[in-house]
Amino acid sequence: MSNYRNKNIDRYAEMFKALSNPNRLKIFMKLISCCEPGTVASINNSTGEAGCACVGELGRDLGIVASTISHHIKELRQAGLIRMERRGQKMECWIDPKTLTALRNFF
């Protein structure tokens, strides 16, 4: 197997590892269902409230605290499933459409 294929396999393994956690999978699916891939959702770090209602309600829907949601979002970002950028006090996150295309092509 070529190095390129090995790198892709490693990348997919990291994605699937992150998505193997039920709460991370729920967060990922919620972001897909409520926000068009590529659309930015803002998360306020100090309060856990979000600029996008779907993310703001995410903690309530999952029954987990904001700090735990932040941890799961960080894990999803490190696996390359979502993108994040700080804008002042807020963290904006979104699902890169290219990531969804890559997953779709994998299957």
Image: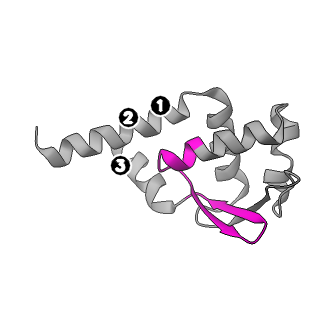
Question: Residue drawn 52% across and 61% down?
Answer: 96
Question: Is residue 104 found left or right of 29 in the rendered image?
Answer: left
- Crowding at dot 2, Cα within 10 Å, few <14 / some 14-19 / many 20+, comes out as few
Q: Which mark is residue 17?
A: 1
The image shows residue 27 at horizontal and vertical percentages of 68, 42
Distance from Cα at disc 2 to Cα at disc 1: 6 Å
Q: Please state the extent of the stretch shown in magenta in the rendering.
A: 75-95
Question: Which amino acid type is shown beneath numbered disc 2?
Answer: Ala
The residues bearing labels 2 and 3 have C-alpha atoms spaced at a distance of 15 Å
Can residue 107 be seen at all in this image of the molecule? no
- Please say if the residues under marks 3 and 1 sit with CB atoms less than 8 Å apart: no
Give the image quarter of residue 67.
top right
Residue 45 percent location from the top left of the image: 79, 55
The relative height of residue 45 versus residue 11 in the rendered view (above or below) is below
**Residue occupied by mark 2:** 13
Q: Residues within 10 Å of mark 3 (few under 14, many from 20)?
A: few
What amino acid is labelled 1 in the image? Lys
Classify residue 33 as left or right of residue 5: right
Tell me the quadrant of the picture where the N terminus can be found. Answer: top left
Residue at 71% across, 62% down:
91
Find disc 3 in the rendering and name its residue.
105
Q: Nearer the viewer, mark 2 or mark 3?
A: 2
Q: Position of residue 76 (x, y in %)?
A: 56, 44
Quadrant assignment for the C terminus: top left
For image coordinates 35% across by 49% down, the residue present is 105
The number of numbered badges drawn on the structure is 3
Q: Which mark is residue 42?
A: none
Packing grade of label 1 (10 A; few <14, some 14-19, many >=20) is: few
Was residue 88 drawn as part of the magenta stretch in this picture?
Answer: yes
Task: Evaluate if marks 2 and 1 touch, with contact meaning CB atoms under 8 Å apart.
Answer: yes
Distance from disc 3 to disc 1, alpha carbons, whole Å, reads 18 Å
